[in-house]
Image (spheres, rainbow, N blue to C red):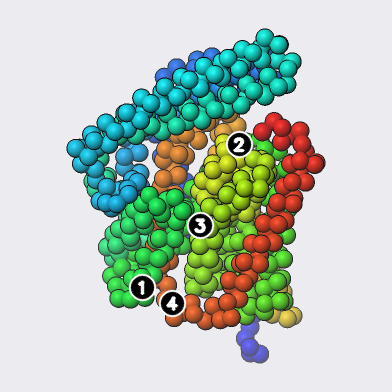
């Protein structure tokens, strides 16, 4: 450009500013933020003004009981557990209006042999099931009564020694644990005994229409045809429903094959056989759906819960994760010599951080091809299904302590839902630790995306002798991550302001679990179905040459498993054993 005249600096600045202003209503990233904020605002308006009756008095009464019992005995007594149970029952989601809302947000229900039962259960069938379950419930009540009597006798024996006899204390703790297990089984039997007939067709139509309007308005403002979008969206939404139905089948649920995997599989079956119809393609908008869901996910990352587990959990998530990410990227480039750096970093982020969410953010930051993102997500889904079954089974078989097992699960299994399920297999304590470590790890989504954007602009795509401007990094950085971080900060402030108990009742088991989380999961289901519908095996084939992405994932995850276990053991049992005892 020898004859070209460089424009004045002030003209460039004005152009950049005008582009930024227009982006606020013309770009997907910003629309994901606005929609996420709108959904969360609606959730707050629905739940916060309608707390359960006598909430404060119930909390104060049971907190007092728990305090006195903690002073009386060196272990959690029967009265302490009963008070805890009363507090847990105090949930905004148990209110009548929340249950009505749940009917419209719920995914298809569990089924065994007849897929229609995921959407419709005949009154006669519900009655027969309920009667059979009532018999099991009555038996469970007898077992609970017997276990409670034994627990009381064991606790009384420990109390007679003024809780000074360690053997009697241990016997009491063991007997109370048996009673709690019996209570849990009885609660499940009670829920089955109260099963009512249902018809999910109407509520799903309403939900689909509302989601189509919500996303369609954004499409219209961004300059896309709203009518064509809504027509294609209907097809994608039906595919998402089918994916949920596959997940809730009894055997598939047992082995952990969730809706993300099925949505991709069903979409690929269509796109690679008859081909995705042209009229569907306007509704296939992977990033629009997933980015909105990720903004909603930010509201679930609460700083109060992160701090509750202390430095060990933070160290496991924030030190191990970047080490694994950098090491696997180096391994992919220097040892495996993977040709595509964008594929390499996307797979590395997917495997080391938190699965799909990190893969989406990283792919946006380095501008990976959609086929590369699909490959990374596919690997993640398969290994997540394997690990959520194999890892807790291995932990139990070799006798790894519950807290250590939970931290190991939280730091290595990719999907948040799979982490909770795998942790629950070991026990409540493991589930809490696993979910919290994963929540801490989720914070790194934005951090990783930011540094990947910097690295790609300054190193990977930098032209020798050309100066890199800050604005180029800003353009590369995925803006929806700001929504993720912003919602995390906002809801952490709300959580801290309300206090632990009220927040658990109104925010965690209200706004989040009762409203935003179900919508977030529907957004993810739509995104995964879109990924499948837009994926061509012929385009993926070139990335599988030599099996390098698979080797990268297996080697990286093996390193991740070993390092996470080592660091978790050091932090929870050698450096901070006092925190571990209190969990």
Q: Are marks 2 and 4 in contact (CB under 8 Å)?
A: no
Q: Which residue is mark 4?
A: 537
Residue at 67%, 44% in the rendered image: 400
- Nearer the viewer's eye, disc 2 or disc 4? 2
Q: CA distance from mark 3 to mark 4?
A: 22 Å
Mark 1 or mark 4: which comes first in sequence?
1
- Nearer the viewer's eye, disc 1 or disc 2? 2
Mark 4 Cα shell of 10 Å, populated few (<14), some (14-19), many (≥20): few
Mark 2 Cα shell of 10 Å, populated few (<14), some (14-19), many (≥20): some
Identity of the residue furthest to the bottom in this view: 2
Mark 2 or mark 3: which comes first in sequence?
3
Q: Are marks 1 and 4 in contact (CB under 8 Å)?
A: no
Query: Is 62 above or below relative to 431?
Result: above
Q: Quick check: can you spot residue 222? A: no
The disc at residue 271 is 1
Q: Nearer the viewer, residue 202 or 23?
A: 202
Q: Which residue is mark 2?
A: 429
Query: Is 64 above or below relative to 225?
Result: above
Mark 1 Cα shell of 10 Å, populated few (<14), some (14-19), many (≥20): some
Q: Nearer the viewer, residue 563 or 396?
A: 396
The disc at residue 385 is 3
Element on which disc 1 rests? helix
Percent coordinates x, y for residue 327 in the rendering: 72, 66
Residue 485 lies left or right of residue 46; in this view the side is right
């Amino acid at each position: 450009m020898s004859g070209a005249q460089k424009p004045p600096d002030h003209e460039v600045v004005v152009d950049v500013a005008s582009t930024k202003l227009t982006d606020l209503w013309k770009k997907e990233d910003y629309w994901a933020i606005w929609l996420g904020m709108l959904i969360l605002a609606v959730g707050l308006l629905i739940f916060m003004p309608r707390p359960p009756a006598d909430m404060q008095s119930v909390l104060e009464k049971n907190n007092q009981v728990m305090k006195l019992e903690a002073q009386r005995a060196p272990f959690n007594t029967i009265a302490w557990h009963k008070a805890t149970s009363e507090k847990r029952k105090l949930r905004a989601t148990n209110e009548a209006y929340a249950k009505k809302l749940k009917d419209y947000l719920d995914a298809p229900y569990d089924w065994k042999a007849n897929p229609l039962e995921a959407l419709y259960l005949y009154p006669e069938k519900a009655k027969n099931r309920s009667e059979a379950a009532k018999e099991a419930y009555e038996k469970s009540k007898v077992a609970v009564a017997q276990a409670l009597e034994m627990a009381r006798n064991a606790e009384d024996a420990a109390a007679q020694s003024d809780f000074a006899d360690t053997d009697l204390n241990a016997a009491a703790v063991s007997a109370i644990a048996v009673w709690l297990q019996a209570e849990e089984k009885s609660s499940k039997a009670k829920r089955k005994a109260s099963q009512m007939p249902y018809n999910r067709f109407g509520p799903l139509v309403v939900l689909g229409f509302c989601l189509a309007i919500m996303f369609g308005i954004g499409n219209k403002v961004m300059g896309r045809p709203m009518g064509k979008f809504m027509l294609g969206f209907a097809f994608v939404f039906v595919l998402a429903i089918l994916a949920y139905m596959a997940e809730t089948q009894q055997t598939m649920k047992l082995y952990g094959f969730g809706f993300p995997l099925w949505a991709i599989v069903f979409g690929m079956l269509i796109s690679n056989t008859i081909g995705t119809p042209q009229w569907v393609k306007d509704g296939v908008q992977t990033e629009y759906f997933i980015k909105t869901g990720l903004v909603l996910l930010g509201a679930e990352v609460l700083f109060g819960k992160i701090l509750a587990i202390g430095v060990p959990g933070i160290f496991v998530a924030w030190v191990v994760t970047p080490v694994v990410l950098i090491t696997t990227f180096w391994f992919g480039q220097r040892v495996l010599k993977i040709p595509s750096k964008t594929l390499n970093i996307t797979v590395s982020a997917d495997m080391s951080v938190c699965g799909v969410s990190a893969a989406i953010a990283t792919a946006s930051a380095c501008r990976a091809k959609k086929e590369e993102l699909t490959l990374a997500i596919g690997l993640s889904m398969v290994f997540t299904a394997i690990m959520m079954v194999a890892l807790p089974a291995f932990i139990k078989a070799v006798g790894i302590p519950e807290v250590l097992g939970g931290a190991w699960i939280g730091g290595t299994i990719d999907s948040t839902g799979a982490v909770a399920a795998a942790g629950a297999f070991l026990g409540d304590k493991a589930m809490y630790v696993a979910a919290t470590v994963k929540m801490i790890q989720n914070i790194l989504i934005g951090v990783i995306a930011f540094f990947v954007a910097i690295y790609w602009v300054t190193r990977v795509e930098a032209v020798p002798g050309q100066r890199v401007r800050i604005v180029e990094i800003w353009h590369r950085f995925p803006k929806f991550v700001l929504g993720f971080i912003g919602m995390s900060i906002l809801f952490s402030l709300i959580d801290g302001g309300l206090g632990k108990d009220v927040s658990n009742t109104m925010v965690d088991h209200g706004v989040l679990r009762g409203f935003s989380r179900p919508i977030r999961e529907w957004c993810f289901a739509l995104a995964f179905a879109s990924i499948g519908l837009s994926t061509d095996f012929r385009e993926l084939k070139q990335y599988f040459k030599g099996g390098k992405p698979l080797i990268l994932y297996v080697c990286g995850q093996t390193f991740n498993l070993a390092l996470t276990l080592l660091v978790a053991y050091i932090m929870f049992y050698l450096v901070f054993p006092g925190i571990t005892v209190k969990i």
